[in-house]
Amino acid sequence: MLRTLLQGLRSPVTERVPYDPDIAALAANLDRVAQRKLGRSLSIREVDAGSCNGCELEIHALNNAFYDLERFGLRFVASPRHADVLMVTGPVTRNMREALERTWRATPDPKWVVAVGDCGAGCGVFADSPACVGAVAKVVPVDLVIRGCPPTPTQLLQGLLALLSAR
Amino acid sequence: MTLVDVDYWQVAIRCLAAGEVTLLGLWGEPGRVHMAVFDHSVVVLSLDCPNGHYPSVGALHAPAIRLERAARDLFGLDPVGLPDTRPWLEHGANPTAYPFLPVEGEGLHQIPVGPVHAGIIEPGHFRFTADGETVVRLEQRLGYVHKGIDHLMHGATLDQATRLAGRVSGDSTAAYAFAFARAVEAALGVEPPPRAAWLRGVMAEMERIANHLGDFGAICNDASFSLMLAHCAMLRERVLRCAVTCFGHRLMMDRIVPGGVAVDLTEDGIAGIRSLIDEIRARFPALVDLYDKTASLQDRTVGTGILSADLARRFGAGGYVGRASGRDFDARRSIGYPPYDRLHFEVPVLTEGDVNARALIRVKEIDQSLSLIEQMLNQLPVGEVRVAVEPHGPAEGLAIAEAFRGDVLVWLRFDPAGGIDRCHLRDASWFQWPLLEAAIEGNIVADFPLCNKSFNCSYSGHDL
Ligand code: SF4
């Protein structure tokens, strides 16, 4: 076991992060802006307010070795009380409305809200459902929208950068 | 669909309770209730309820209880004799007023968790009653991501409905689209071109591999072995990158459509998938070996969260949940549909029923899926990948496809103008969620994330 484990560590099974000019440019930029605005780190709390879970899969992917979100000082935290940013997915369902509002209230100021996905942006294919309240902006103030169904990890990174630059 | 009378309905209930047949689904529409049962084939029994009530299936057969509570919330159909009359998907104006089951006993305490959880996961509420560290009861409350899909389907065009079906549970989008397309084709008597059927199979197996890889890593991560997650997440990412180059979407959303598939696979795409297979085969066995040899990891997964074979059978548990507890059922083989009826594969079954068994079923299935994809690429028929579909009504269709977590059932009926009149999509999670409540009993609270991940039920697929 030890051999396999050490082998994995010495010549990592995880490849070096493949060079992607888009991500590299983003990384450099994000790093600069993030440091200026927020010091070293930005804490993100993810809230699924009605998603089909497709958006969650891609948000998860931000943590894999290819995107390695923490390089940029961005990280997901377990509690809204530790968060600077709420990333909210899904058409907000009637059954999640209160939980979303409470999560937002539990997040200390200053805070920013990112609505993720076509659903978070405008209810997507679930528009007009009586079981849904609507886009995220109908329930909490939204600072940035990242569209896509689901948005790719690269689009998510781009969005976070845009949020930082705009402020 | 077979329209039955109350007497026949009650006979069916008795057969279910006696374990002679398996419940595959139960759903409603205004004034009518349907149930799907599996004997050697799938049968849909429908009962008119002009007065809004019908004999409860859940009264004698517990797996139907949540389905009946849901059908009552959505369509006002009252199951007479239902032992649990609380709402299920409908949370009402005061969502915190839900009456949880009472618990009594000295030294018991309760731990409420959710709906917003600590990780990047879907919302649901878990109420643990614990005696010290030991869980004596878990009660789930779901429905938080209820989006009204049954209602949205009513009156949708075929295109709208196709997109909606692919968004019931995003992690199984290909499987849902597969089942939906086949239900439409069954209703309209359309035969997709052979090449399309094979490409559907390729996509469905890629989806299965991606999810199983992710789950295997995440299960180990919940046992504090994060190294495995790092490796598996990377392999999973490779699958998604291959999917986007071959089919134009990382999760392959909207690629399987009624009449065939929306994109053809090029020679470059085939080469890309072949090298993906090589890479997984080169890297994954070492990870499985590491899993096998890491005693601290096995210590957490072996003997944890045991689901008995009897419960798995009674609930008709699909996917790895059932197959890790001795239930030898896989829609690809037990029901059979193209392209699987022409391919060779094994359905791994274990009997231990613990977290370890559910993890190992996934490992074995990854191997089978790689071989399936290889067979499909080797024998890929040439020709068209899509035929025109002219919806017309009234026509009804049903299909089942094996998603990574179990069988997805889709039933639909067209209206006379060719729109969707009714469509119901039943996720495997409906029958797995209640079993998680049983499996966690007697385990320590700290093992819940591990058990939960080993089930990996869909919230969205269940909440509809
Ligand atoms: S935007 Fe798409 S992927 Fe995201 S929750 Fe909505 S339907 Fe699912």
Image (cartoon, grey):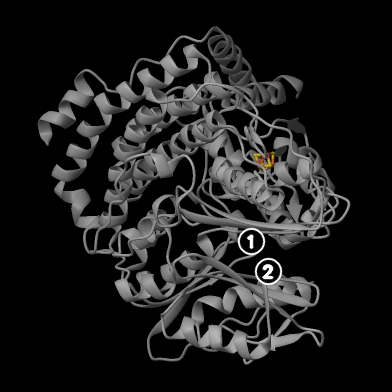
| Location of mark 1 (residue) | B463
Mark nearer the N terminus (2 vs 1)? 2
Q: Nearer the viewer, residue B246 or B227?
A: B246
Label 2 amino acid? Leu
Q: Nearer the viewer, residue A20 or B94?
A: A20
Q: Pinpoint residue B445: horizontal percent, then vertical percent.
A: 36, 67
Q: Pinpoint residue B418: horizontal percent, then vertical percent.
A: 84, 49
Q: Secondary structure at mark 1?
A: helix
Q: Are marks 2 and 1 on the same chain?
A: yes
Q: Chain of mark 2?
A: B
Residue at point 31% right, 70% down? B443
Q: Is residue B26 left or right of residue B232?
A: right
How many marks on residues? 2
- Residue B145 in view, yes or no: no
Compared with B65, B347 (above or below) is above
Compared with B38, A1 (above or below) is above
Q: Are marks 2 and 1 in contact (CB under 8 Å)?
A: yes
Residue at point 42% right, 21% down? B273
| Location of mark 2 (residue) | B89
- Residue A150 in view, yes or no: yes
Q: Where the N terminus of chain A falls, by quadrant?
A: top left
Q: Nearer the viewer, residue B222 or A111?
A: B222
* Mark 1 closeness class: few <14, some 14–19, many ≥20 residues within 10 Å: many
Label 2, label 1: how many angstroms apart (C-alpha)? 7 Å
Label 1 amino acid? Asp
Q: Where the C terminus of chain A falls, by quadrant?
A: top right
- Quadrant containing ligand 1: top right
